[in-house]
Image: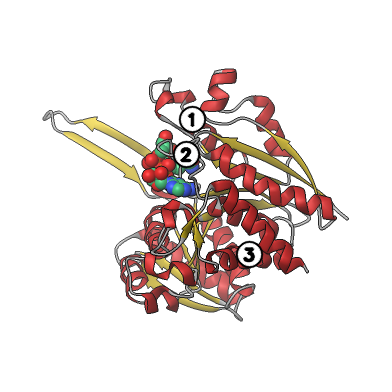
Amino acid sequence: MATYKVLLLPGDGIGPEIMAEAKKILDWMNETGIARFEMEEGLVGGAAYDAHGVAISEEDMDKALKADAVLFGAVGGPQWDDVPYEVRPEAGLLRLRKDLELFANLRPAICYPALADASSLKREVVEGLDILIVRELTGGVYFGEPKEIVTLESGEKRAVDTQLYHEHEVERIARVAFDLARARNNRVHSADKKNVMKTGVLWDDVVRRVHETDYADVELHHILADNCAMQLVRWPKQFDVIVTDNLFGDILSDVAAMLTGSLGMLPSASLGPADAEGRRRAMYEPVHGSAPDIAGQGKANPIAMIASLGMMLRYSFGMGDWADKVDQAIANTLARGVATADIAWDGARVVSTAEMGDMILAELKALAG
Ligand code: NAD
């Protein structure tokens, strides 16, 4: 059996509380011989700043580079609001994304039946929803140069951001999206603004070329990003995989996120380029932050963290069957009428972070047979 090296970076606030619940599942998988995870732990964010004066130490960065996957909690909190900009908690996250070259951000939006009423949309629109947004994460307008505010001779200020994409950046994210679609419902929508942006024209050309040459079996649709936003709230179940650039992905993934009800439910994966054996550097993390308002109270919802672990099993370790079981264990737990406070519906029994983690693990054990 292969041994997988996993680096756990719990971070700040509720990070360590939710990570403890994910770790229970990894420990159980180790004990039962389902897999062999070699786990190391490190500090990131405010915790790393307090210990080392930086947002992540070189030693922990080295561990991240050597790991098969990184499981990340959350960083930040008011106690670090005034630390120098370069060592603020988020700098640890950005450094990890940059040094691991995590160019593909995957955000699933799954609506569990028990939570369909938590969405702002009607139950029939969201119940059973399962879509995946694939966002380009390292290029586009967030990084393009020039990026500046200049004062003109007239004294007026002018701000510039540059939307910039190379063919290879579009090609590699398109390939990730098509590969993922093949393992799902085989449908990709590529969203851009080719009607008004040159980067959109190039984006569409490259996606079509990659499709024609290597992925003709996958259903491909082009959609303008603004229409995509509308369709996401009109009838989201028409989508399977949506691939889009950094800026549109930022917005569309937040829209999709809210279809499912709560921040505490949303996992994510960020993948890097494949090596010669097809293995990718990868980091898995909940979408939410460190929730300082509820930290240390046992109120945090561990589901986004546990679902992130599920994504790790699926995308880094080829354990799709176990990832399915983790998702099913979450669904079964909710179907029993238990919830953490953030997702509690009328009549639900409100449980703590640890109780929720224990119940999901118990469901997983039952599914394992
Ligand atoms: P947040 O996501 O931490 O919290 C927003 C709201 O959602 C809060 O009311 C919080 O209690 C609730 N919430 C979030 N996750 C929850 C969970 N698992 N269970 C129950 N409730 C949950 O966002 P914020 O309040 O804007 O930011 C707090 C800190 O987190 C800031 O320092 C911010 O910079 C940082 N942050 C970090 C990340 C990250 O580490 N990836 C992402 C976003 C924000």
Point out residue 179 in the picture as x, y percentages from the top left corner.
63, 68
Between 48 and 243, the one lying in front of the other is 48
Mark linked to residue 329: 3
N-term mark: 3 or 2: 2
> Which of the image's four quarters has the N terminus?
bottom right
N-term mark: 2 or 1: 1
Mark 2 — residue?
290
State left or right for residue 2 relative to residue 287: right
Q: Is residue 264 above or below residue 6?
A: below
Point out residue 104 in the picture as x, y percentages from the top left corner.
55, 54
**Does the residue tagged 2 have its C-beta within 8 Å of any atom of ligand 1?**
yes
Mark 1 — residue?
89
Name the quadrant containing residue 224. Answer: bottom left
For label 2, the crowd category at 10 Å Cα-Cα, with few meaning under 14, some 14 to 19 and many 20 or more, is many
The quadrant of the rendered image in which ligand 1 is seen is top left
In front: mark 3 or mark 1? 3
For label 3, the crowd category at 10 Å Cα-Cα, with few meaning under 14, some 14 to 19 and many 20 or more, is many
Q: Amino acid at mark 2?
A: Ser
Name the quadrant containing residue 277. Answer: bottom right
Helix, strand or loop under label 3 = helix
N-term mark: 3 or 1: 1
